[in-house]
Image (cartoon, rainbow, N blue to C red):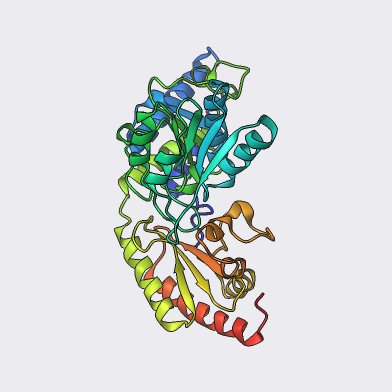
Amino acid sequence: MIYLDHNATTPVAPAVLEAMEPFWRGHFANPSSSSMLARPIRRALGQAREECAAFLGCAPEELIFTSGGTESLNTALHSVTSQQPGRRHLIMGSTEHEAVLQPASWLEQAQGYQITRLPVDADGLWSLADLAAAIRPGETAAICLMWANNETGVLHPIPEAAAIAAAHGIPLITDAVQAAGKIPLNLRESGVSYAAFSGHKFNAPKGIGLLYMARNTAFQPWFLGGAQENRRRAGTENIAGIVGIGAAARLAGEHLTHASLATLRDCFEQQILQCIPGTHRNGHATQRVPNTTSLRFDGCHAEGLLLLLDQRGICASAGSACTTGSLHPSHVLTAMGLDPAAARSSLRFSFGLSTSQEDLERVIHALAQSVSKFRSLGTAG
């Protein structure tokens, strides 16, 4: 199997599994216990927090361990809205992940919030001018903007947006799930108030994530019921997962060498665009993470192409794993101006450190055959 769906999830690194294994077996104590059995657990928890902080460019005490990006984003939104009941306006990008769009829609429909959704251009980028114009002094509670888009890989100017937010005293929440491990991050210098991360996007296990909360940021917990995480997230910690994300963060920091992936990606794109007629790239050509390409194929349907590729041992995707199987076209691609048929003809290929040139040559050949077969059947819709 050639796996080109690393934006959906990544394989757990062997070194991460090795680091986690003792915490499934011998080190089983509750870290909140006062017994001597809990001491190595607490040490491991602190070490993992330090490893994640070094990777992300922040202080260990600015990080909260969560179950993943969705919880982190929901927690950040809960914190900023619950502390500012008089501010009933939110700003977000129109291409955000459902982990932002759905809680925002709930706030809009059930709580009477007003939402400004920033439009994007054909490259998938919103503008800083539109952001500045959307701010309502005294009314805007938060700005929610993703750092890297999960479908197109497009990178947004988050530090610049954070500066605009700070000038108005508005917290900026960023979904940085697809940025971690793909571009260098320094949260301390970014100016963001909150940032969400998911371990399984950079070779940690599923079910563990991080919420960054800048020092001196007011915080209202979402999970109540215990003193864990310095009273910021109640519940017994997932120690094996925490050790895993710490190990993965250390590895990602040591191997943040994705220039080679960008070279592979660009060569892959160029060959497909040249050898398969009626093929187009979605998203900005250069302002994106190095491992992601979104391509659309005229006269094809993504689900059909994925089936043909799967039969040839190739795994890709039609976009976000969280909306796989949806009858609706990608909201990211339609926000960029694509009509529903064009959006449904798009595939996402996302590479990992194990991706090789030989793999991609096989994919290009299989993709050309699959597109030709699909078009010959005339079944696109």
Q: Is residue 43 visible?
A: yes
Q: Count the marks: how many?
A: 0
Image coordinates of residue 116 in percent, x first then y, are 53, 41
Q: Horizontal placement of 90 versus 269: left or right? A: right
The residue drawn where x is 34% and y is 31% is: 58
Q: Is residue 24 visible?
A: no
Figure check: 378 above or below 208: below
Based on the displayed image, in which of its 4 quarters is residue 226 positioned?
top right
Q: Nearer the viewer, residue 72 or 339?
A: 339
Q: Horizontal placement of 69 versus 291: left or right? A: right
Figure check: 2 above or below 287: below
The residue drawn where x is 62% and y is 73% is: 301
Image coordinates of residue 269 in percent, x first then y, are 40, 71
Q: Nearer the viewer, residue 375 or 249?
A: 375
Q: Horizontal placement of 261 versus 319: left or right? A: left
The residue drawn where x is 68% and y is 59% is: 325
Quarter of the figure with the C terminus: bottom right
Based on the displayed image, in which of its 4 quarters is residue 59 positioned?
top left
Outermost bottom residue:
376
Q: Nearer the viewer, residue 227 or 319?
A: 319
Image coordinates of residue 335 in percent, x first then y, are 53, 57
Image coordinates of residue 368 in percent, x first then y, are 50, 81
Based on the displayed image, in which of its 4 quarters is residue 281 positioned?
bottom left
Figure check: 145 above or below 369: above
